[in-house]
Each structure stands twice: as C-alpha cells, then as structure tokens.
Amino acid sequence: MAELATIARPYAEALFKAAGAQAAGLTEQLATLGQIAANDELRQFADNPKVAAQQVFSVVTAAAKTPLDSQVSNLLQVVIENGRLVALPEIAAQFKALVNARSGSSDAIVYSAFPIDGAALAEVVATLEKRFARKLNARVELDPELIGGVRVVVGDEVLDTSVKARLEQMKVALTA
C-alpha cells in the first residue's frame, strides 16, 4: 500500500493548498468520494477501456448524491482522467490528516464492548485529550470481544484498558 500512499500524496497536498481555509469543509465530500471509489464494481467499470472518463465521472458524482464543490469536482476529474480512481480513498485519508494537522487534532477510534452515550463519551474524550495532549475527533465502534472497558486508537498509538487485554496480561504473567 505504500505505492498508493505515494500516488495519493500529491493529489491530497494539491487540494489542501488550493482549498486553503476552506479545506476542513471539503473533508466530508472527499470522504464520501473515497467510500464510493472503494467499491470494486465501480473500479471494474472505471478500468474498462470502452468506458470514457466522463462516464465514470458521471457515475461517481451521481453516487455522491450531493453537489460537489468545484475544487473537489476538479480533483475527481483529474484522478479519473489519470486512471487513479483506486487511490481516491487514500487521497481522502491523507487530505483528512493534513486538515487535522493544521487544526492540531487527531482522529480517534474508541472500541467499546457496549454502546457509549453522549455524556459518557464526552467524559472519555476529555480524559483522552489530556492523555494524548491534543484535540480528538472520536468515533465509537462496538467490539463485543473486549468484554468490558475500551480500546482507543489514535493514529499509531493504542491505549487498551479492556477486560480482554487485562485477561491476556494475567495469562502471560501466570504462564511465565
């Protein structure tokens, strides 16, 4: 996947520079396009030599179901014309990382065995922001295998306070 990251970087940086202060407002549109481009059937359609770039562009924009900003639309057109639709999810991820870096925040995934309500999540996020020393954009994913507690992933950092992790630690300590 390093190759996709290398391909995606110039596109993400170009859109980020072109968007300037409006970059944060484009992340949602770009994320939607990234999800659409991840569809295998769409990529097969786009890779068909009998299909024109404009047809692919029309299909992708129709699937987005919302009008695209002109800069995002231009990026999409260039990506399709250059045969780089496969890199669009990575472009969206790198663009989001650039926006986060500018704002001094990071995306966090909070894995929990049970649903977390709004007040509890706000409390958890406040504690995590102190721990990671930056603002976090948290989202919760359910993982029943954790049994209890949470597992937090922020970039390449992991904080695991789940019951499953504690049981694994006890197992290692007892068998050592």
Image (spheres, rainbow, N blue to C red):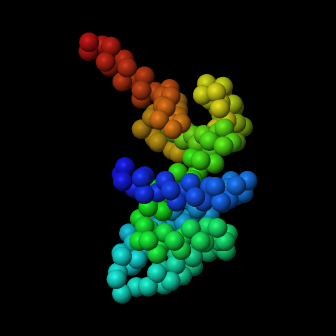
Which residue is drawn at the image coordinates 40% and 56% (left, top)?
Answer: 4
Q: Kindly tell me whether residue 29 is visible in this rendering.
A: yes
Q: Which of the pair 100/164 is nearer the observer?
A: 100
Q: Where does the image place residue 51, in percent across and percent down from the top left?
A: 40, 85
Q: Where does the image place residue 117, in percent across and percent down from the top left?
A: 66, 41
Q: Tell me the quarter of the image containing the C terminus.
A: top left
118 sits left or right of 140 in the view: right
Q: Is residue 125 above or below residue 44?
A: above
Total marks shown come to 0
Which residue is drawn at the image coordinates 51% and 38% (left, top)?
Answer: 155
Examine the image and state in which quarter residue 58 appears.
bottom right
Q: Where does the image place residue 64, in percent across and percent down from the top left?
A: 58, 72
Which residue is drawn at the image coordinates 33% and 13% (left, top)?
Answer: 173
31 sits left or right of 85 in the view: right
Q: Is residue 43 above or below residue 124?
A: below
Q: Which of the pair 19/57 is nearer the observer?
A: 19
Q: Is residue 167 above or below residue 34?
A: above
Examine the image and state in which quarter residue 33 appears.
bottom right
Q: Kindly tell me whether residue 137 is visible in this rendering.
A: no
Which residue is drawn at the image coordinates 54% and 41% (left, top)?
Answer: 109
Q: Is residue 67 above or below residue 170?
A: below
Q: Where does the image place residue 75, in percent across and percent down from the top left?
A: 56, 68
Examine the image and state in which quarter residue 129 appears.
top right
